[in-house]
Image (cartoon, rainbow, N blue to C red):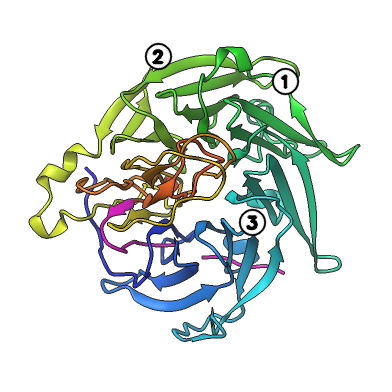
Amino acid sequence: MAQTIASFDTAHSGPIHDAQLDYYGKRLATASADQAIRIWDVSTESPSFLAELKGHEGPVWQVTWSHPKFGNCLASCGYDKRVIVWKEMSMGHGGGAHGGQGENWQMVYKSEDHGASVNGVAWAPWEYGPYLASASSDGKIAILHHSTADQQWLRTEFHAHANGVNAVSWAPAATPVVLASGPATQGPSLGPMRIVSGGSDNQVKLWQYEDRSQKWVERAGIDANNGHTDVIRDVAWRPNVGVPSSTIASCSEDKTVIIWTQEMEMEGQPWKKAQVIQLDGPVWRVDWSVTGSVLAVACGDNQVLLYKENLEGKWELITNLSDTQHTAQPQQQQQAGAMDAMGGGMGMQQQQQSPPPPQQQQQQQPVGQPGMGMGVGMPPPHTQQQQQQQHGQPGMGMGMPQQQQQPGGAMGGMMHQQPPQMGGMMGPGGGMMGGGGMHQQHQHQMGGQQFM
């Protein structure tokens, strides 16, 4: 059963949109509408403040830690169209801040090349190296790569979705074919780099990097006419679980979660709609536990659900984290969080709202938004369509939302104003599985890494 493991005031002056634990679960990075990122040591009973990073000029939607192989590096994105990579230059735990940044942290890269709000960032599997993908409301996905040869950042981009990209997720480094054939005796053991994206055009798309042309190309497979009927909010590629197949989960404003599968990933083989999970409200976030054995789903009605695959290959509901709040202690009623079995980040929500997203949206409606994520949450995008809604941004993690008296998100989600569709929202939030979420005023828990 999920339970609260920690609670503290993060001292942010605005709603928290995302919170993520590092690889070891000892540090937590929080992103807020106050344009700041704060880093905490949560390895002890009393979390301690380490640094505040200031480089954004608008709400910060998401933060994500790189693998520790590359050092203590953190990537962030926000409404100001920026993607920033931060690096801790020493292992000291300085708590002060100079020039708006933690004294041990430096901004090693900043990109303002996107034409609209950047809604999400995601590091590639460490086996490929330091690659970072960003999804924007300008309809493009950008891929950043740090070259160790000349210590430069290289950037490529491609148009992915009309009206904005709301989510992006990397495929595992080892393909099902490699898993099925066993250790490779000849040739590369890693599969090509692949990502899945979801956008405001109601489509889920697959992309693959081709070494020959050195370009990202769209891969056929998911039938756009047999999928979601409304804006895609999130997509998540399932980690390898030792079986020769690939699985992707997608969620949408159409109140469904779709599980897509592809056997052996044979060239040209279509993805099958293995299961459709019908829910009572819009679904904001989906994410997998680190082992891929549990799927977390965060809904617009403040429900955070955990699903597990049965022997017949169907995903069954095993826990409604929202129900556990009734058994919490009075002093814990304002928040709830739990860490996924394999680590990750956690998010939380506040009881204050962030400024409404720009873009050309109109109506505003108060909505409580839960979220989820594998150790971190990711913000819902801001596109140039649809209406504005006030809601908490979902995040994921194996956490449980608590009090839902205020509009806001559960699990790895924060409160903020954003539109009804990803790729057009003001404040994203979310967590990834492997972490948990909290419900309260400016509170969170855990996030660490290095390179360059």
State yes or no: discs 2 and 3 in contact (Cβ < 8 Å): no
Is residue 65 something one can see in this rendering?
Answer: yes
Relative height, residue 44 to residue 115 (above, below): below
Of 287 and 189, nearer the camera is 287
Which mark sits nearer the N-terminus, 1 or 2?
1
Q: Could you tell me residue 36's position as x and y percent?
A: 48, 69
**As shown in the figure, which amino acid type bears the numbered disc 3?**
Lys
Is 249 inside the magenta-drawn segment? no
Residue at horizontal 47 percent and vertical 49 percent from the top:
428
Q: Does 385 sit left or right of 438 as displayed?
A: right
Q: Position of residue 75 (x, y in %)?
A: 59, 61
Residue topped by disc 1: 220
Dot 1 amino acid type: Ala
Would residue 238 be seen by someone viewing this image from the given angle? no
Q: Is residue 339 left or right of residue 237?
A: left
Q: Quadrant of the C terminus?
A: bottom right
In the picture shown, does residue 334 fall above or below 388?
below
**What distance separates the C-alpha of mark 2 from that of mark 3?**
45 Å
Label 1 and label 3: CA atoms lie apart by 30 Å
Instruction: Specify start and end residues of the magenta stretch as a single range.
Output: 437-452
Residue on which the image places disc 2: 312
State the SS at label 2. loop
**What is the crowding at mark 1: few (fewer than 14 residues within 10 Å), some, or many (at least 20)?**
some
Q: Secondary structure at mark 3?
A: loop
Q: Is residue 393 above or below residue 204?
A: below
Label 2 vs 3, first from the N-terminus: 3
Q: Which of the two labelled residues, at mark 1 and mark 3, occupies the earlier sequence position? A: 3
Residue 420 image-quadrant placement: top left
